[in-house]
Image: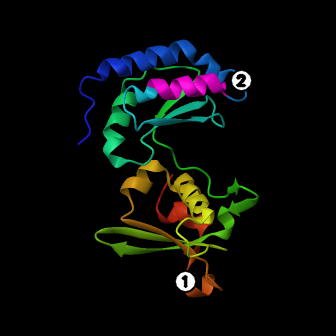
Amino acid sequence: MVSIFGKRDNVKAFWEWFAANRSQLIGPAEPDERFISKCGAQLKTIHEGLVFVVDLQQAPPRFVVSADGDPELFPIVEDVVAKAPRFDDVGIVAFRQPGPTDVAIQFGDQMLASASLWFETAPLDGGISLTVYVPGLSDSDDDPLAQAAFMLTDNALGEAFMALGLTDLSFVPLPPNPAERGLRPFTEIAKVFHVP
């Protein structure tokens, strides 16, 4: 059980600091590295597991408070965001939100596009099991393709659904002729799970 008892003053102090320093977030094309570092440190005074994401693609820009996928921290994230002041120039959002399904991730000298992935679902323990099929994936547990595929899946479904909507998630090598096997293109994943 996670508690924020005794840390409520830290929430207030964080938002006071954020209000005074948010121009470093919304002014430049990219947030200042010192702001990023200081903001992370300030947020961790509330709870060590909290992280944030800055989404400059939105207008106004979004400051996303995240539990980094840990469902035990979701109540803390909700509490922190509920106590945020209202800003005209930046939106405050709880949890990484679902994003586009037609993206690619560069890792090292490789690129993985979501359009190259396929998936299938199955009922499991009263929930949903999701299997994502990844071209070129090896059987190794530390294959960087699996991490890239996880990031694409997290981006497509959003943090809350990834943590609470799935009972199992696995990444496996893509077989030949995926459509003939009944697999679905990854670009359809948001429709299947009714993610906005």
The reply, left or right, for residue 158 in relation to residue 134 is left
Residue 132, compared with residue 75, is above or below; it is below
Where are the magenta residues, as a range? 31-42
Residue 121, compared with residue 58, is above or below; it is below
> For the residues marked 1 and 2, what is the alpha-carbon distance in whole angstroms?
47 Å
| Residue found 52% across the figure and 25% down from its top | 39
| Residue found 56% across the figure and 86% down from its top | 181
Quadrant assignment for the N terminus: top left
Amino acid type of disc 2?
Pro
Describe the element under mark 1 as helix, strand or loop.
loop
Q: Position of residue 51 (x, y in %)?
A: 48, 36
Residue placed under numbered mark 2 in the picture? 28
Amino acid type of disc 1?
Gly
Does label 1 or label 2 sit earlier along the sequence?
A: 2
53 or 191: nearer the eye? 53
| Residue 173 sits in quarter | bottom right
Q: Is residue 41 magenta?
A: yes
Describe the element under mark 2 as helix, strand or loop.
loop
| Residue found 56% across the figure and 72% down from its top | 140
Which dot marks residue 182? 1
